[in-house]
Image (cartoon, rainbow, N blue to C red):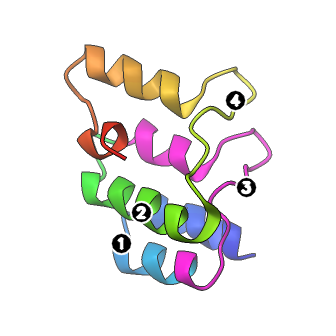
């Protein structure tokens, strides 16, 4: 259930709630039914969401779950890494993704 709350907090750009859920044990590597991970969510909405949200996700995931996996595929075959590269080509690069 904490995983569902994590997705909701990410979609709503609720930084404090994301921190709380990750520190309480929400696993950021668990994908939803479509294979979408929390990192997919952050990268898909990077123009709308603050980059600090991606930083929080990457830092807290690293502390608790080892480095967050950046290559899990969703059902369409997209990975967070592919999305980050695409955004970098379009000058929408989330810097925090490339420096962790």
Tell me residue 20's x, y (percent): 49, 84
Please identify, in this view, whether the residue under mark 2 or under mark 3 is nearer the observer: 2
Q: How many marks?
A: 4
Give the distance between the C-alpha atoms of the residues marked 4 and 2, in whole angstroms. Answer: 21 Å
Earlier-in-chain disc, 2 versus 3: 3
- Which image quadrant is residue 47 in? top left
- Which stretch did the figure color magenta? 22-45
Relative to 47, is 85 on the left or the right? right
Residue that mark 1 sits on: 15
Q: Are marks 1 and 3 in contact (CB under 8 Å)?
A: no
Residue 56 visible here: yes
The CA span between labels 1 and 3 is 19 Å
Badge 2: how crowded within 10 Å, few (<14), some, or many (20+)?
Answer: some
Q: Are marks 4 and 3 in contact (CB under 8 Å)?
A: no
Where residue 2 sits in the image (x, y, percent)?
Answer: 68, 76
Question: Of all residues shown, which one is farthest toward the right?
Answer: 33
Compared to residue 7, the image places residue 14 above or below, namely below
Please name the residue shown 61% across and 23% down the image.
78
Asked which quadrant contains residue 94, the reply is top left
Structural distance between the alpha carbons of marks 4 and 1? 25 Å
- First in sequence: mark 4 vs mark 3: 3
Q: Could you tell me which secondary element the residue under label 1 belongs to?
A: helix
User: Marks 2 and 3, Cα distance to the nearest angstrom?
Assistant: 17 Å
Q: What is the number of the mark on residue 59?
A: 2
Q: Which residue is mark 3?
A: 30
Residue 50 visible within the image: no
Q: Real-space Cα distance between discs 2 and 1?
A: 13 Å
Helix, strand or loop for disc 4? loop
User: The N terminus lies in which quarter of the figure?
Assistant: bottom right
């Amino acid at each position: 259930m904490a995983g569902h709350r994590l997705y909701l907090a990410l979609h709503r750009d609720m930084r404090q709630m994301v921190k709380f859920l990750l520190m309480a044990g929400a696993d950021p590597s668990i994908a939803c039914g479509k294979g979408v991970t929390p990192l997919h969510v952050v990268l898909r909405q990077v123009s709308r969401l603050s980059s600090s949200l991606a930083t929080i996700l990457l830092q807290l995931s690293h502390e608790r779950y080892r480095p967050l996996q950046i290559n899990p595929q969703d059902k369409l075959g997209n990975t967070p890494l592919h999305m980050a590269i695409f955004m970098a080509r379009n000058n929408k690069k989330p810097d925090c993704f490339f420096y962790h």
